[in-house]
Structures are given as C-alpha cells and as structure tokens.
Amino acid sequence: MSLDSGAVAAATTKQPPSHRAGKPALSEGKKAERRLGLWLCAPAAIIMVAVTAYPIIYAVWLSLQRYDLRFPADREFAGLSNYGAVLSSGYWWQAFLITVIITVVSVAIEFVLGLALALVMHRTIVGRGLTRTVVLIPYGIVTVVAAFSWQFAWTPDKGYLAAMLSEGSAPLTGQASAIAIIILAEVWKTTPFMALLLMAGLALVPDDLLKAAQVDGAGAWQRLTQIILPMMKPAILVALLFRTLDAFRVFDNIYILTQGSNGTGSVSMLGYDNLFKAFNLGIGSAISVLIFIAVAMIALLFIKIFGAAAPGSEPTGKR
Amino acid sequence: MTATAPANKKIGWGVINLLVILYALIPVLWIVSLSFKTADTITDGNFIPRSWTWSNYAQIFQIDLFTSALRNSIGIAIIATVIAVVIGTMAAYAIARLDFPGKKALVGVSLLIAMFPQISLVSPLFDIERAIGLFDTWPGLILPYITFALPLAIYTLSAFFREIPWELEKAAKMDGATPLQAFRSVIVPLAAPGVFTTAILVFIFCWNDFLFAVSLTSTSRSQTATVAISQFTGASQFAEPTGSIAAAAVLLTIPIIIFVLFFQRRIVAGLTSGAVKG
C-alpha cells in the first residue's frame, strides 16, 4: 500500500543531496512550486520574526553586559564574564542536576503512560468521547491552580494525600520526596499532551495493515513494535521533542510546590530569581541563554536519533 | 468491527476506561471539592466536603474583573487559535510537500522560538508593545500567542502531512472527481486528525497562559482570566482566597471540556473511516 513507502522513507536516515548552486535554470513548474512554498510560509515566518527577533537579540545582548538594576550606573559591556560566573557557580550545577533528573524521569514516565492512554483512547469501543475528553482535562486545568491543589493535598492537616501518610511527615520539605511530588504533578498534568499527539499519530496507522499482520500471525507486541511505532515515528518525535523542551524549563510546579527550597530549584527558577527577584539582568539573561543552549543540544540529539523523521529533512516534497 | 464486538470485550474496555478516568479525575475532583467547601472547613483535609456551599462561585461573579476577564480570555484564545492553525497549516503543507529555498531556515527558526526561555523575552516584549501602542490590547496578546503556538503547530502538522498518501488525490481525480471534490473527500479526512489535535493544543496554551497575560496587560480591557484569578483576595482582606481560586479554576476548565468534546471526534483513523464516510 501507498502508506508503506512513507514509513520506509521516514525510517531510513539517508542524507538529502545538497542543493547545487550551479544548477541549470529551473523549469517553469519548479519555479511555481518555489513561489507557492514561499507564499504559504510567509505569514508564519513574518509573525514569528517580527515578534521574537528583537526580544531574543536583546536578551543575548543583556547577557554580555554587567547590568544590575540595583546599581544601574555600573552598566558596562562584560563579554562572557556573566557566563563564567554562572558556570563556575555551584547553584547552577545543582539546579542543572535537579532539572535533568526531573526532565528524564518525567518524560520517560509520560511517554510510556501517554502511549498506553493513546492506545486506550484510540481503540476503546465504549465511551470513546467521554474517555478522550476526560483524559485531556488535567492538561486543560490552569497550571498554577493545579500545582496549588497538589501543594494543598500534600500539606499536613490540609490535604487528603498528606492524611494518608504517617503522622508528622511533611513530604514537601524533604528533597527526594519533594522532587517525587514535583514529578508526579508534572506527569499528571502533561501526559495528556503526549497522549493526544500520539493518538493523532495512531490515527495514521491503517487498520487494514494491522489486520493483515494479525492474519499473518503477528502478536500484539510484535504489531506494536514492528508496525505501529515505526509508522508513528514523526508523531513520537514531535511529542518527545516538545515535551522535553518544556520539561527542561519546568517552573510553575516548582514555584508553587516548594519555591525551590531544600535543593529542589530548577534552572528556570534560578533564571527567574536572578531576573525578577535580584534584578540582576546580566546574570539572569546569561542563565536564559545557557538554558537555551542546553535545550538546543537536547533538540539536536532528538533530531539526530530520529533522522529523516524530522520535518523539512527531505530534499524534495513528496508527490 | 464495533457492531460485532462481544459483550465481555465491552466490559473489559469499560473497566480500562474507568481506571483511566479515575487516574485523570481524582486530582480534579479535589479541586472541585475545595471549590465547594466553606471557609472554615477548607483546611480540614477531607476529600469530600463536610459542608457544601455555593458561596465561592457566587463570590467570583461579584468581582467585575472576572466577568470581563472571561470575555477577554474567550475572545483572545479563539482568535489566536484560528489564526495560528490556519497560518500553521499553510506553512506545514509547504514544508511537507513543496521544495523551496529557506525551508530549513523556517523549521530552524520555529524550533529556536520554541526553545528560548520565555521569561527572558517578556520584558523586551513589554518595551516594544509600550512603544507601538499594543500594550494592554487584544492584539498585544494575540500576536505573542500566535508566535509561540506556531512552532508546535508547524511541527505537528508537517509531521502529519508528510504521512498522508497524496497519490490518493490523483487517483480520485482520475476516477472523475473534480480537484475540489478530490481534496474534500480524500485529503481533508486524512489531514483532520492533525489539524484538530493542533487546534486543541493551541487553544489550551492560549487559554492557560499566565506569563504573557500578566506582563502585557494592565486593565479589564485585555486582562485574561488566569490573571484575574491571581488577583483574588478572599471574602475579607484576611481570608485566604483558596475557595474562590478553586471555583474559578473549575469554571475555567469548562470551556476546555466543551472545546475538546467538540473536536475530539475528528481525531479518528483517517484512512479507512475517511474512505468510507467521505
């Protein structure tokens, strides 16, 4: 079937031939295709550049300055010294480690759980609309309020979850237990995002193909790993990529649950504290740029792993 | 297949669905429970309120700010979602199907925007909006929302579009369908899951945003509901606003439920069901 060729193309990691500069003149059809492509992309490109170009350049510029709002007169160009200050600070590496732990653990749990939820939502034969809608509710709830309700639930004498623990335990004040609660809140809140994207990916796997495989004697696990997952590769890339980018910048849940106390602060908390509490714009911006670099490395890693499943990686459009 | 499913299979799915629903709903019910508790029992830790009250709900509608904020939230989120999905669909179609210069640059730029920490972008955005008069207006929020929703929209949609077997469109045309018929009966059903998934995610992003809303608005002209919640103070100056915050969060979830209920039907197996239903 026609879908097979798409899956094969997505699975192989062939390098696209580079565009040659000295190519003979383009045919009329090619020119029209180029024009159409540019016109279709223009609105998105213009809005994105117009809104973010100045703020991003400004933030990078600030990160190269000594600029503390408490001492505005001392503002001067400082080269990379802000970066040196951040990277040689124990606070940064402590926050970095916590962020990595939260990101890896929560994204791993979310992927497995999200895939399971997606399969249930996709295949269930009773109450499909109800299940799909209810599963998405956690993602729809205002993040800060959801975090606040978790905080309430885990606070001794105030919450139903704390009431289940032994007398006198305050889980939000220990480092390990607080991080576990932060991960729980993250997983509960954002698994629906993963599940929804994966479910839409499942919608692209044709039932006929699965039935044919079943007739040929492929078990459920084989069908999942040999047919469903490879065909969903692009959807999995998008879901994992965007979830990891977000998880690495975890902020709301920590801000509400622990305020970053007892060694639970993430790199975004550190950036926020420097920008909006200490008013040290130079250091705060340097932290933001470092977060960006870390996140960019994660994204590149994903795109390398998934190869040609990344958008725009094919040299020519499919017809 | 659905019609001939045996009864015990249905019961099995029923049990699985119930488990899934419980997992998703228990923390939500806790918020609902908080929203119905009276001021003196709110900290008692009971999952089910011992005494019920509507006063938390009555209270938030006495705040003028909340009603106008709800209107702003609905208007801004819907406009931003529609524009982001339309523009994103155009760009994603081009990325998935056409060959043109600058394609990689566009994919790269959108990923860059998705990666840069937003907290460091709000103060320069604030400066720009003040300078050109967009501060505290609907477009002043709609534009950033479209911008920060577009990367996800473009990635999701182009991932879907490249999996669509576009040859089917040609086949339909050969069978005598007009280009519009071929597009409507073959391509639209196949593209729908991706488009509606994107619409749901973008709407939730705009609806729940706090960072941009709190930094780029200042009055009831454009303040959204998430900002209004953060300004609750409770019945008296000294009372904690926990109950009203919970009640407002419950109210804010209802439009999301309606939105998802409305659109989730379109996320179905595209190929087979689309080919039959047309």
Image (spheres, coloured by chain):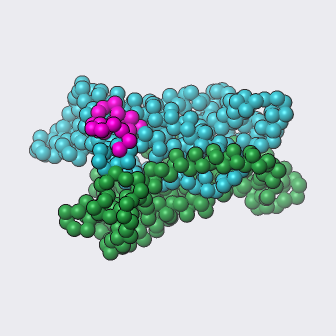
Chain colours: A cyan, B green
- Tell me residue A72's x, y (percent): 13, 45
Q: How many marks?
A: 0
- Is residue B58 among the parts visible in the rendering? yes
Whether B68 is drawn above or below A112: the answer is below
The quadrant the N terminus of chain A occupies is top right
- Tell me residue B260's x, y (percent): 57, 58
- Tell me residue A168's x, y (percent): 27, 38
Tell which of A37 and B34 is nearer to you.
B34
Residue beneath the point at 37% across and 68% down: B53
Q: Tell whether position A181 is magenta.
A: yes
Tell which of B204 and A27 is nearer to you.
B204
- Is residue A311 among the parts visible in the rendering? no
Q: Tell whether position A290 is magenta.
A: no
Q: Is residue A73 left or right of residue B29?
A: left
Whether B168 is drawn above or below A263: the answer is below
Most extreme residue toward the right, as rendered?
A: B175
- Tell me residue A219's x, y (percent): 76, 30
Residue beneath the point at 29% across and 63% down: B39
Q: Which residues are magenta?
A: A163-183
Dominant SS of magenta comes to helix
Whether B70 is drawn above or below A83: the answer is below
Which quadrant would residue B218 be assigned to in this image?
bottom left
Q: Is residue A8 left or right of residue B29?
A: right
Residue beneath the point at 77% across and 49% down: B7
Residue beneath the point at 66% across and 55% down: A127
Tell which of B157 and A225 is nearer to you.
A225
